[in-house]
Amino acid sequence: MVTVATDLWDVVASVVDPEIPVLTIEDLGVLRDVTEESGTVRVTITPTYSGCPAMRQIEDEITSALLRAGVEDFEIIVVHNPPWTTDWISAEGHRKLSAFGIAPPSSPHDILCPRCQAHDPRLVARFSGTACQALLVCSSCGEPFKQFKVLR
Amino acid sequence: MSSEATQWVVSAPPQGSQPLDLPVEIAEWVAHADDNLVLAQRLGEWISWAPDLEIDIALGNIGLDHLGVARNLYTYAGEVEGKGRTEDDFAMRRTERDFRNVLLVEQPNGDFAQTIVRQFFFDVYQIGLWDRLSVSDDDTIAGIAGRAAKEAAYHLEFSSSWVLRLGDGTDESNRRTQKAVDALWRFTGEINSAAWQNQVTAVLTEASLVVPEDPYQRVGGRDGYHTEHLGYLLAEMQWMDRAYPGLEW
C-alpha cells in the first residue's frame, strides 16, 4: 500500500494522454490534485476539450495505475471549474510537444515549424486529427505539421 | 406569405411518454444538452460524406464538442436531481416529446450549405448562451459553459467563414446558401435575440446574402413539440439501447 502523497502523485502523474503519448496528464494540466484521507485516495482531474474522447481512457489508465500500485480504495473526481486551458500545459509539455513534431499552443505569429523552426506556416485546417489540433504546412521546408490549438 | 406556413401539424404525445418533471433550472440544463446532443448526431451523419477530408474531420470534431457538452450537462443534471439518472437515461431513454431541443438543430443536414447555415445560426446563439452561463452561480455549470464558450468560438470561425465563402462564391453556391437561409429562418425564433440578429445580419450581408423578412417563426421545441425529423433521428440514435436495454461497451 502506497501511503506517501508524493509517491501517489507520481503514480497517477505517469499516466499519458492516449492521443499524444509523449505528454503525461501532469504535463497537460489535466491532473489537478491527489489526496489521501482515511485510507481513501482522491484523484481530481479536469477534462480538456468537452468532447475529448481520451478522457474516458485517461480515467481507465488512472484506475489501472492505482491498482498496479496496490491502491484499491480510491475515487476519481472530475471537476469542470475552473475550465481547462492550454495555459495549463507545462513548459516541459511544450518542449515534449515540439520534440514530438507538434507545435505547442502559441499565438499565430509565434508558431514555428517543429522540423526546421521556420516562421509563418500556412493554415490548412483548423480541425485536424483531433479537435485540439490544427493542421499547418511549413512555408519553408514544405512539411505538414500539427499545432496544439490555443484554448483560453 | 406566412399564413400558409402556420398550417403546421403538431404531433400528439406518444403513449407512455413520461413528462420531464425536473426543477426549472435542471430542465434548462437538459434542454441545452438536448440541443447539443441532437446537433452532434446530425453532424455525425456527415462522417465520410463531406465535400472534402478537412471538412469531414472538422464537422466530426465539432460534433464531438457538442456531444461532450451534452454529456457533461446530462451527467451533472442527473447528479443534482439526485435520483440516479445517468447521461444514458437522458440521451437514450426519453421519447421525442421529452426532448427540449430547439427545432433548428433537428432539421436535416440537407446539402453542405444547409448544414453550414444551421451551424452558423446555432454557433452565434451558443456563444451568447455560454458567455451568460459562464458566470453562473453554479460552479460546475460555469465551468462547463466557460469551456464550451471557447470551443464555440472555433465553431463560429469555421461556420461563418464558410457562409462568407459560399455566399460570395459562385452563383450556384450563393443560390444554395440563400435557399438554406430562407428554409431555416423560420426555426430561428427560439434562439434569436437583438445581439444574435445583429451578428447574423452582419455576416449574411457581407456574404452577399439576403436576410429574410418573413416574420413567421415556428416554435415549440422547448415545450417538446417537434418537427417530424426528430423522431427519425432518435429512432436511429436510440435503437441499440432500446434493443439491448442496459447494454455497455
Image (cartoon, coloured by chain):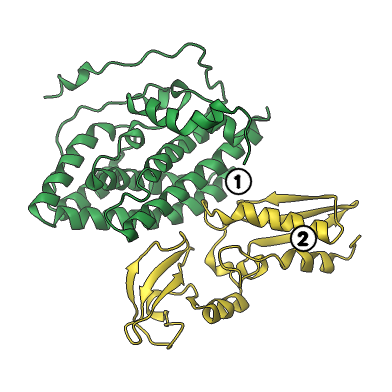
Find residue B140 and name its label.
Answer: 1
Q: Chain of mark 2?
A: A
The answer to which of A57 and B222 lies nearer the viewer is A57
In the figure, the shade used to draw chain A is: yellow
- Residue extending furthest toward the left: B171
**Relative side of A115 to A19, left or right:** left
Q: Give percent across and percent down for residue B202.
A: 21, 52
**Relative side of B175 to B184, left or right:** left
- In what element is the residue under mark 1? helix
Asked whether the beta carbons under mark 1 and mark 2 sit within 8 Å of each other, the answer is no
Q: Give percent across and percent down for residue B206.
A: 16, 55
**Relative side of A98 to B167, left or right:** right
**Relative side of B136 to B178, left or right:** right
The three-letter amino acid code for the residue at tag 2 is: Ala
- Does residue A60 appear in the picture of this structure? yes
The three-letter amino acid code for the residue at tag 1 is: Thr
Q: Residue at x 35, y 37 (%)?
A: B105
Q: Chain of mark 1?
A: B
> Dot 2, crowdedness within 10 Å: few (<14), some or many (≥20)?
some
| In this view, A21 is above or below B235 | below
Q: Give percent across and percent down for residue B61.
A: 43, 54
Q: Quadrant of residue A17?
A: bottom right
- Does residue B25 appear in the picture of this structure? no
The answer to which of A124 and B142 lies nearer the viewer is A124
**For the residues tagged 1 and 2, is the chain the same?**
no
Distance between mark 1 and mark 2 Cα atoms: 27 Å
- On-image quarter of the N terminus of chain A: bottom right
Q: Residue at x 18, y 29 (%)?
A: B215
The answer to which of B93 and B192 lies nearer the viewer is B93
Mark 2 = which residue? A65
Q: Residue at x 50, y 16 (%)?
A: B17
